[in-house]
Image: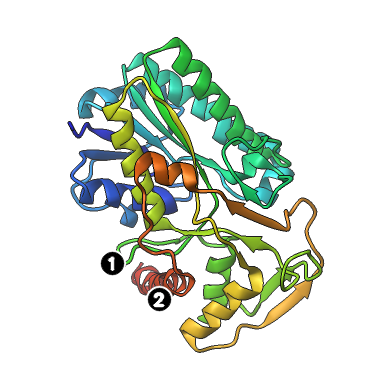
Amino acid sequence: MTKVPVLVTGGAGYIGSHAVLALQDAGWPVCVIDNLVTGFRFAIPEGVPFYQGDIEDAALVARIIAEQGVKAIMHFAGSVVVPESVENPLKYYHNNTVKSRALIESAVQGGVPHFIFSSTAATYGMPDVSRVDESCPQRPINPYGMSKLMTEAMLADVSAAHPLNFCILRYFNVAGADPQGRVGQSTAGATHLMKVAVEAALGKRESVGVFGTDLATPDGTGVRDYIHVSDLAAAHVLALGALVAEPERSLILNCGYGRGFSVLEVLDAVDRVTNRKIVRHMQGRRAGDPEALISDNRLIKATLDWEPAYADLDTIVAHAVAWERKLGEILDKG
């Protein structure tokens, strides 16, 4: 199979930077565009062509496609904080929907035949079942989920009208860091539970809030499907190979492990790995939080022959802790 040049949008961010490493490790030519609003220049490996700019800049994207001979786009650029999307919906519809439309148009005009989109389980909203497969109704309950769903719809429509096949990957809860310590979750003020918990364990936060202790789950706290970011990146590389091998086929796949952990189980794991006790503040449940959200991952396993390498909670935590310590050193050096 020919390994075509790939443009990664948001390649200086958390998930995008892991995808860049996975592509590079697998021998795919890769380049990056990122506006560095939330990404970090240090996250991009040496030798990878980097363009600082916005995916909405059609002239810049056209130049990248021409200069690098881009034949596939992996689209990670966007905003990802659910509560912020409720407070500032226009930001999310601009960053996640309007800009995605511009990028898709650039792909069509530039003759890019393959497109992989970073979507989310938030498009399912509050599912009627705790184990969610790809056929579950998509009823987003916040602008973040809706902004991603609108891009999914655009891709389907554009693919029907133009020679573009796509893979939509709907992530569950992404966590952890590169096992080799090359990159990790670096965003200041991140809201992901594991990032917050690791920061608390290392003294960067005083405590962790637990939102909801009376849910219909084994210990009363919310249950989520946590997937290691490097396993997720590997899924993107496999998806790209599938699109290149079968240009007439498009894919929509859940990305998760098919099992869930509660908030308290995650905090217990961080305690174990760090040998410290996180201060926990029990609070009321947040409106719109599903009690449990777990992926049915049978389709991605069958379609891409994807087998997770890091499907162990303590391993995910250990990699997150190692990166958090290294990140402190990087930021201290300035």
Label 2 is placed on what type of residue? Answer: Arg
| Label 2 element class | helix
Question: Left of 311 or right of it: where is 123?
Answer: right
Question: Which residue is label 1 attached to?
Answer: 180
Mark seen at residue 325: 2
Q: Residue 279, image x and y in percent?
A: 66, 83
**Front in this rendered view, residue 95 or 245:** 245
Pick the quarter of the image with the N terminus: top left
Crowding at mark 1 (Cα within 10 Å: few <14, some 14-19, many 20+) = few
| Label 1 element class | loop
Question: Left of 17 or right of it: where is 154?
Answer: right
Residue drawn where x is 63% and y is 51% of the image: 131
Q: Residue 189, image x and y in percent?
A: 57, 62
Occupied quadrant, residue 152: top right
Residue drawn where x is 45% and y is 61% of the image: 185
- The colour scheme is rainbow
Residue drawn where x is 49% and y is 24% of the image: 155
Q: Is residue 271 visible?
A: yes
Q: Is residue 33 visible?
A: no
Label 1 is placed on what type of residue? Answer: Gln
Of callouts 1 and 2, the N-terminal one: 1
